[in-house]
Amino acid sequence: MNALAAAAVKSGVLLFLLLTACAYMTLLERRLLAKFQIRYGPNRVGPFGLLQPLADGIKLIFKEDFAPARVDLVVYWLAPAISMVTALFVYAVIPFGPQLYLANVDVGILIVLAASSVGVYGVILGGWSSNNKYSLLGSLRSSAQLISYELALSFAVISVVLTAGSLSLVEIVNAQARVWFVVLQPVAFVSFLIAAVAETNRAPFDLPEAEQELIAGYQTEYGGFKFAMFYIGEYVAIVTMSALVTTLFWGGWHGPFLPGVVWFALKMFAFIFFFVWIRATLPRVRHDQLMAFGWKVLVPLGLLNVVITAIIVVLLQ
Amino acid sequence: MEFVVFVVAAAGALAGGVGVIASRTPVRSALSLLLVLGNLAVMYLLLSAQFIAALQVIVYAGAIVVLFLFVIMLLHMRTGEGRVEKLRWQRPVSYVLSGVFLSALLWAIWTGTGTQVATSPAGFGTVESVGRSLFTTFLLPFEIASVVLLVGIIAAVVVGRPVVPPSARAHLPPPE
C-alpha cells in the first residue's frame, strides 16, 4: 500500500510540474515568436508577462461551456480528454535523471509509442463529433498525417533500440554513457526529428489546422476548457518529443559537471526552442508534399537504416 | 489488489462488448471496441505479459480501430442507421456461430477447472523471452505469418487500384 501511495504522490508532483511547464511553454512560444518577428509579445500581465498563462487559464475555465448543434456529446467531450490524458501518460516511463523516473518498464519505449498511437483518437473523434465539415476535413488530414509519420518515428526508434539492445528507456540512456546515439544513428535522429514535428502537428507540418483553408481544423468547434485540453495535449506533446529526442539520441541525463536532471532539462529546453524556431522560420508544406515525403523518403530511409543497423549489430557481436 | 484490477478490467471489457453490439452509431461501436481492447491489454498485464499488452494497444487500439473509424468517417454514416441489409443470411448464421463459440468456451472452462495450472517460467512475457521463442522454436510459423501478411498487403493494393483498361493507359497523364 505504501508503494502505491508513493507512486500516487510522485505522479501528482510530476503532473503539477508538467502542467506548469506546459502553461509556460505557451508563454515561451509567444515571446519567442514575437522576438523572431521583431515585436514585443505578451508583456503586460506580471513582470515580463510571467502571469500571462495564469490569466489565460482562468479565462478559458470561466468561458461559456458551448457545444454546437447536433453533436455527439459524449464523443465531443471524450476527444479533448483523450488528447490530454494520452499526452500526459507518456511521462510515467521517461527517465529525468539517474534515479528520477516513475517507472522503469522493460517495454518503456513501446508504451510511449502506444500512448501516442492512442492519442490519434483525440484528433479523429474531435473532428468527427463537431458536426462541421472543416473539422472533419482537418481531422482526416491530421489522422492520415499522424499514421504516416508514426511509421517513420517507429523506424527511428527501432534503430535506437537495436543499437542499445533494450526497450527500456533507462537502459537506452545507460547505453549512451560513452557515445551518444546521435553520433551512431544520425539518420535515425534526423528522421525522428522530422517525424516528431509532424506528429505534434507543428509548423511546417501544421496542415490539420491550416487556418487559411480549414479555419482551425479539428478544434474549430471547441472553446473554453475543452479547447484548453486540446492545447495542453499539443504542448505536452512538444515537451514529450523534446524529452524523447533527449533520451533516445542525446544521452538523456549524461553530461559533465552538472547533475543529471539539469542536463536533461537543458537538452530538453534546447529542443523545445528548436520547435519554436522552425515554426517561426519555415512556411507550411502542401498536403501531397507531406504525404509523398513521408511515404517515399522517410519510410524507405528508416527501413534501410534499420536493416543496416541490424547487420552492423550482428557483425559486432 | 490484483483481484480488484481484474474485476474493474473485466467489467470494462464486458461493458465495451455490450456497447459494440448495442450502439446505434457505428462510431460508438468502434469506441466500445476500443474499450474492450484496452481492457484486454490490462488483462495481459495481469498475466505478466507486458510485451503483449503494449503490442495489443499499439496494433489493435492504435492501428486497427483507427482504420475502422477512418472507414466510418469516409462513408459519412452520421446517423449510422443500417441501410437495406443485403446479406440477409448473415444474421441467423451469426447467432449460430456465437452459440457454438459460447458452448466451446463453457466446455473449455468446465473441463479446465481442477486441472493443474502451468506455472510461468522466470522472465515470462518479457521481450527477451517472447523474441527468443519467436526466432527459435516458432521461426517457421513466424516467417509464414509474415509472408501471409505481405500477400494481404499486396492484394489490398491491387484491389484498391482503379481499374484502367490497357487501351486507355496510353492517354493517361504520367503518374506524379
Image (cartoon, coloured by chain):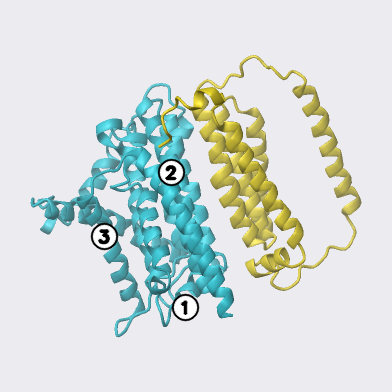
In x, y percent, where is residue B74?
49, 28
Marks 2 and 3, how far apart at CA? 27 Å
Tell if the residue under mark 2 belongs to the same chain as the one under mark 3: yes
**Local SS, label 3:** helix
From the image, tell me which residue sits under label 1.
A174
Q: Quadrant of residue A107?
A: bottom right
Q: Which chain is assigned cyan?
A: A
Q: Are marks 2 and 1 in contact (CB under 8 Å)?
A: no
Question: Along the line of sight, which residue is nearer the eye, A63 or B134?
Answer: B134
From the image, tell me which residue sits under label 3.
A274
User: Viewed as shown, does residue A282 lie left or right of B31?
Assistant: left
> Mark 2 against mark 3, which lies toward the viewer?
3
Marks 1 and 3, how far apart at CA? 25 Å
Which chain hosts label 2? Answer: A
Colour in which the image shows chain B? yellow
Residue A244: numbered disc: none
Marks 2 and 1, how far apart at CA? 34 Å
